[in-house]
Image (cartoon, rainbow, N blue to C red):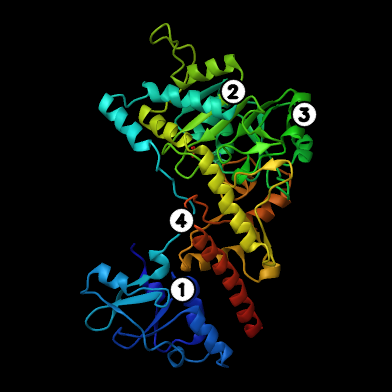
Amino acid sequence: MNKDISLNLLAAHACLKDVLNALNRGVFGVVFITGQHGEVKGLFTDGDVRRALLNGANLEAPASQFMKKEFIFGRSASKREENIRLLSERVRHLPILDEKGCLVDFLSWAEMWRLPVMEPTLGGNELKYVSDCITSNWISSQGSYVRAFENEFANYSGSKCALTTTSGTTALHLALVALGIGAGDEVIVPDLTFGASANVVLHTGAKPVFVDVHPGHWTLDPDLLKAALTPRTKAVMPVHLYGHPCDMDPIMDFAHKHGLFVVEDCAEALGARYMGQLVGTFGDVGCFSFFSNKVITTGEGGMVTTRDQQLYEKMMLLRDHGMRKNRRYWHELAGFNYRMTNLQAAVGLAQLEQIDSFLTARRKVAEQYSRCLSGVDGITLSPEMDWAKNIYWLYSILIDEAVTGVTRDELIHLLEAEGVETRPFFYPLHSQPPFPDCDAEFPVADRLAVKGISLPSSITLNSDEIERVCGCIRKLIDNHRIMANFIS
Ligand SMILES: *Cc1c(COP(=O)(O)O)cnc(C)c1O
């Protein structure tokens, strides 16, 4: 990793306040103090600053008085592996110095033991099936894995028909186009979701109309649908956000009453259930994503599911340029090329074989997070309504600055310094440039968007790693309290 080490460097005449500022700007929570010729004289972590302040130093005091002068360092002439070996839980920051003692790089324990938000797990038959594609020469969109993956997916997801696509986004687009949605139409979309949910509506020529989300489960609030209805409304797109299902009964009632299509965005929620029923089976079409961070992956890829044979055939036609099967190069419709390759489907089939263990592991990760963080004031845990089975795609929490003293963005930055990668929630869609201006207000989405943070959620996380993440969060909030008391 190439970091900009200049942000972590301060001259010897700096004061403690400069150190605090530099700690906030630089990476991995360390600041190096340099002498006249650029030689490293000492270093600071936030713990060192805190100790200095607790011992009565004031913020204007010279940093050089309080810096850690004795420290272990690596040499630029040494092999990288030798330097890495010097890191430990106690030696968390290792400056790499040249022969003059000047900083050329530094290594951080946090950087070496980084926990990503999500990693795919490819431990099943993926390689075997992909090798089979290569050795058999079937690598494109014809080939037996595409059909096999679609059949197995239809079985698993409880839908009559399933059709692979190139991505979750093209699955959504295909569904809307096949339903005949276009210019002059409106589609109701939650204000808090990944942008693709609304982008595809724009791509059909229709207008996305945003509705706020529910404060309890963060997905489309059914009570607010009515206010968004106009004579142009053609469809509703419930998005099962972060693995939690939408409140489907009232959404389906509303859609039936007003003759609207329902396109479910299940990109984050394969396997999630509402009142025991799998998401994707309520509406006209269920749309899934197999991007590398989703529940199962094909690298890039997606799927549409439906119980409607005619709609299925229309989606199949549109997926392949709108060409009729039995009349070559005759275009019935102006379609797309949204076909998945056999290579991707081979990976998908192998992934689907493991879905039960994937979902069990996800719930286990979530249970441990909920247990570890349940006592922390100012933190709201990932929700699970009593009618819901959340698959906890990303274990996500809300942080209430008024209680913790730490803002969401500060927490993200501080966790980054501890090697814990996180993700902020999505920006509310109504606030973003591509989407039409609207008069409605979205207080819940606005609030969640600044408080929400998703934690590392790979199914391979072990209990020590989850404990490490939770321990960091608790420590950072406690530290902040101590510092805040001191400064005020
Ligand atoms: C990932 C995602 C998509 C898009 O899926 P891609 O496969 O990345 O195109 C759509 N909607 C939501 C809610 C998603 O999380």
Asked whether, in this view, residue 251 is left or right of residue 58, the answer is right
- Occupied quadrant, residue 81: bottom left
The residue singled out by tag 4 in the image is 116
Of the 4 image quadrants, the one containing the N terminus is bottom left
The tag earlier along the polypeptide, 1 or 3, is: 1
The residue mark sitting in front, 1 or 4, is 4
Mark 2 CB in 8 Å range of ligand 1?
Answer: no
Of the two numbered discs 2 and 4 on the same chain, state the one appearing first in sequence.
4
Distance of label 3 from label 4 (alpha carbons)? 40 Å
Q: Disc 1 and disc 4: Cα gap in Å? A: 18 Å
Residue at image position (44%, 24%) is 148
What secondary structure is marked by label 3?
Answer: helix
| Quadrant of residue 224 within the rendered picture | top right
Q: Which of marks 3 and 4 is nearer the N terminus?
A: 4
Residue 354 visible in image: yes
Spatial separation of the CA atoms under disc 2 and disc 3: 19 Å
Q: What residue type is labelled 3?
A: Asp
Binning the other alpha carbons within 10 Å of mark 4 as few (below 14), some (14 to 19) or many (20 upward) gives some
* Mark-to-mark CA distance, 2 and 1: 50 Å
Q: Identify residue type, mark 2.
A: Thr
Out of 54 and 484, give the one closest to the viewer. Answer: 54
- Answer yes or no: do the residues labelled 2 and 1 have beta carbons within 8 Å? no
Q: Mark 1 points at which residue?
A: 29
Q: Which of marks 2 and 1 is nearer the N terminus?
A: 1
> Residue 253's mark?
3
Question: Relative to 35, is 341 above or below?
Answer: above
**Which residue matches tag 2?**
306
User: Looking at the image, which is closer to me, 33 or 365?
Assistant: 365
Element on which disc 2 rests = strand
> Which tag is nearer the camera, tag 3 or tag 4?
4
